[in-house]
Amino acid sequence: MLQQCTACGHLTRDLAAAPAAHRDQAYGGEPTLDKARLALTYREMVRSGVPDSVFEIGFGTGSMLRRFVDVGATVAGADPDQLGLRVDEVVRQHGDLYACPVEEIPHGSVAVDLVFGIHVLEHVIDPAKTLRIAHALLKPGGQVQFFTPAGDSAGLTVYGSAWWMLEDPTHVRFFTAASAEQALRAAGFIDIEVRRPLLDSLSTDIASIARRFARKSTPHGVLASKAVLGAAAVTAPLVIAGRAVVPAMRPTLQLIARRPR
């Protein structure tokens, strides 16, 4: 079972105690879905304008950083390359990249307008330290944005251990709106805003239903099934409509905050 903080609702997970039929691998997405999700996430992040400089915690293949390069931003990032991914060549040439955890970057080596992480915080053992480092990487007045599974999503209540966000064995924590705000404030951030994106992880509901009725877990997860992917595509309009009516069903938190000037 998940352990929950009685004060803020923050959830932590010991995989031995809460396996939830997890898959074998950390990555269990699908390239086409990931590409669409990336576009939607980028649109959310630049809603108030494109920053001049960005730093991504956990840049993966560099796909998101490439979008910022293409619009003229200076890019940097850190990633320990745990999945052995090939980084976009344009990003590799133009970015200030660190092949290590963000905690190992020399202090004062980077100062940017935006620090962001897309589904990263749920993986880290010490999120308070990660947030303090994100704060240090920002210029005064700079902004931080994180996307992370919502531990207070109604989906966790509806689907229980079948909730798709539990399929990843490296998801060791789930922020709630309250715990995220508390953590950001403790790290020194101000102007904190917690949003629940309508269009993030649209396959979560179908994937959760598939997990509930699956006879056994598979190494690559339920989204490796073409039938599940097809069902996700067909039901996407219904999922969007349902989330519009019941925002609590949205599975993701978008955390936005600013470093004081």
Image: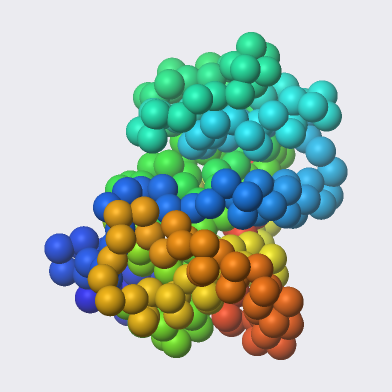
- Where is residue 217 shown, x and y percent of the image? 28, 66
Write the residue at 62% across / 17% down: 89
Q: In the rendered image of this protein, does residue 44 appear above or below residue 202?
A: above
- Left or right: residue 108 compared with residue 113: left
Q: Residue furthest front?
A: 227
Identity of the residue drawn at 63% across and 50% down: 32
* 106 left or right, relative to 170: right
Is 237 situated above or below 52?
Answer: below
Name the image quarter holding the C terminus: top right
Quadrant that contains the N terminus: bottom left
> Left or right of 170: which side holds 199?
right
The image quadrant that residue 115 belongs to is: top right
Number of labelled discs?
A: 0
Nearer to me, 207 or 82: 207
Spot occupied by residue 145 in the image (x, y as percentages of width and height) = 62, 49
| Residue 201 in the image: above or below residue 136 | below
Q: Residue furthest left?
A: 16
Residue at horizontal 74 percent and vertical 31 percent from the top: 68
Q: Please state which of residues 193 and 155 is positioned toward the viewer in this rendering.
A: 155
Residue 23 shows up from this direction:
yes
Q: Position of residue 113 (x, y in %)?
A: 70, 33
x and y percentages locating residue 203 in the rendered image: 57, 67
Work out whether residue 183 can be spotted: no
Task: Specify the color scheme.
Answer: rainbow
